[in-house]
Image: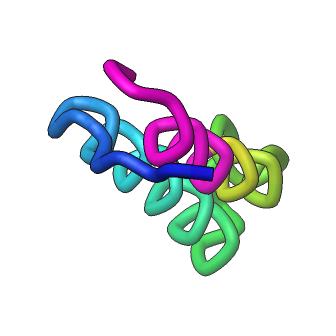
């Protein structure tokens, strides 16, 4: 399996989504983010993996 670096927008989108999940876990008083904190981190990592596995993403 050949890996390629993700585009900058894909990388930063995955970082922002992952950070929202971490912030949602650390600050449970955020009503829109906290219930989905785990899934935001999972989606952020999945987006980063897809960006590495697929060319052009």
Left or right: where 17 falls relative to 8: right
Left or right: where 5 falls relative to 45: left
Which one is in front, 45 or 16? 45
| Residue 55 position by quadrant | top left
Q: Position of residue 52 (x, y in %)?
A: 46, 47
For the point 16% across and 39% down, which residue is it? 8
| Residue 28 position by quadrant | bottom right
Q: Residue furthest bottom?
A: 26
Left or right: where 34 falls relative to 48: right
Which one is in front, 54 or 2? 2
For the point 45% across and 38% down, which residue is it? 51
Q: Which residues are magenta?
A: 44-57
Q: Is residue 21 above or below residue 17?
A: below
Per the image, is 48 magenta? yes
For the point 25% across and 45% down, which residue is it? 12
Kindly report the secondary structure that dominates the magenta region of the rendered protein: helix
Q: Is residue 54 above or below residue 30?
A: above
| Residue 10 position by quadrant | top left
Q: Is residue 43 above or below residue 37?
A: above
Q: Say which quadrant the C terminus sits in.
A: top left
Which one is in front, 37 or 43? 43
Q: Residue furthest front?
A: 1
């Amino acid at each position: 399996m050949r890996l390629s670096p993700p585009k900058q927008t894909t990388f930063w989108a995955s970082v922002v989504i992952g950070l929202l999940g971490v912030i949602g876990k650390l600050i449970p008083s955020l009503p829109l983010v906290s219930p989905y904190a785990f899934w935001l981190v999972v989606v952020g990592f999945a987006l980063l993996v897809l960006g590495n596995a697929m060319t052009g993403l």
